[in-house]
Image (cartoon, helix red, strand yellow):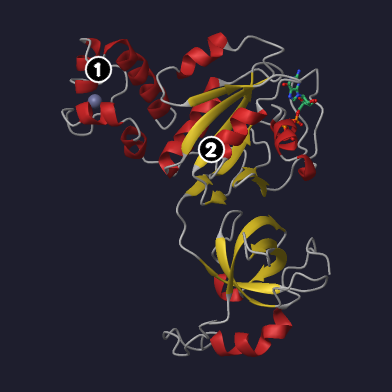
Amino acid sequence: MSWLSEDNDEDEDKYADYEAKSRPNPKGNRARTKIRPEHKDAVTGRVLTVDRGRYLVLVGEGTPEEHEAIASRASELRKQPVVTGDRVDLVGDTSGVEGSLSRIVRIQERKTLLRRSADDSDEVERIIVANADQMLIVVSAANPEPRPRLVDRYLVAAFDAGITPILCITKTDLADPTEFLKNFVGLDIIVVQSAEDKWPLETLRALLSGHSTVAVGHSGVGKSTLVNALVPDAKRAIGRVNTVTGRGRHTSSSTISLRVGDGWIIDTPGVRSFGLGHVNPDSILRSFTDLAEIALECPRGCTHLPGSPDCAMIEQIGAGRLGDIGRYRLDSLQRLLSTLA
Ligand SMILES: Nc1nc2c(ncn2[C@@H]2O[C@H](COP(=O)(O)OP(=O)(O)OP(=O)(O)O)[C@@H](O)[C@H]2O)c(=O)[nH]1
Ligand SMILES: [Zn+2]
């Protein structure tokens, strides 16, 4: 059976007995009394990719027995999405041999969770990736034109999730990114530049080493090109940018984890928007520790946006506290907060 199979539930019969025991009493709404099996023999794995109800899971990571297994999701997890990057417990046939199918019975506690809320272009909230500790925000210097607001949105999502952002600006052979990059000088983030035939592979490998890095970017910015250069076996589809609209075709359709040295890069499909309805402004302020300290003196409910009455940050930074960099940082913070306003 292909793990790309459309049918999510064809393995259910194998577990019919188990299902029957764990189903709630159809008549009542009493709590279930049956104790579920504890799955003591479960093995742990890393979800590499998800495709139509099938999960590709890496089992025995870093051991001589390391292999990929295909899994479905136990019915008791039905309401909980399992996403790329999740650590899961598997039962059943975890051998990974052709036709084998195991079953995810538990999702281990997540260290981070990157989400995007429903918005105009996508009406459901999506969890993009679990357990990433870095976000590589890929943006092109030209073709398509860089959009600071989209980068701001990625930054907000990263700060909110407690994920460290890194900015990678591609296609610097086509345009000078200096002006664009001025938008981000107030942020304490690493910026990497990339150009055709001058891929910053050593720099990126060093940054990715030992981390789980989710790569995000608007379609067509050259993210797949970079990922392919970093992980030559990955063969991520590379699209052509439509020269009329500057938009890339959607060529990569699923989120996938790829190994880069002793780290992981998690490539996501190019997105045009990034809903942030779930984000609390306080979580953004927390990422600016120097400014957060001043904000303690702000009036209750202060939004810190330009024009906020008696905002301590605006007053003190305006008066030179933290110097020039303070002004840039306040600008950046206000821009990020305004994406939520
Ligand atoms: N001039 C130039 N072109 C580049 C560079 N990087 C990528 N490209 C081209 O940009 C186009 C889009 O690249 P992709 O790697 O498919 O872009 P993507 O961001 O993965 O887009 P999706 O797959 O739609 O998410 C391709 O034609 C690439 O050859 C670069 O540094 N300079
Ligand atoms: Zn304030």
Of the residues shown, which amino acid type is indicated by label 1?
Ile
User: Badge 1 is on which residue?
Assistant: 314
- Left or right of 336: which side holds 192? right
Q: Residue at x 64, y 36 (%)?
A: 271
> Residue 175 placed where, x, y %?
67, 10
Count numbered badges in the picture: 2
Q: Is the residue at mark 2 in contact range of ligand 1, meaning its CB lies under 8 Å from it?
A: no
- Left or right of 311: which side holds 170? right
> Residue 170 placed where, x, y %?
66, 22
Q: Is residue 112 above or below residue 78?
A: above
Residue 311 visible from this viewpoint:
no
User: Which quarter of the figure has residue 3?
Assistant: bottom right
Relative depth, front residue between 72 and 32: 72
Relative depth, front residue between 223 and 337: 223
Which of the two discs, 1 and 2, labels the residue nearer the N terminus?
Answer: 2
Label 2 residue SS:
strand
Q: Quadrant of the C terminus?
A: top left
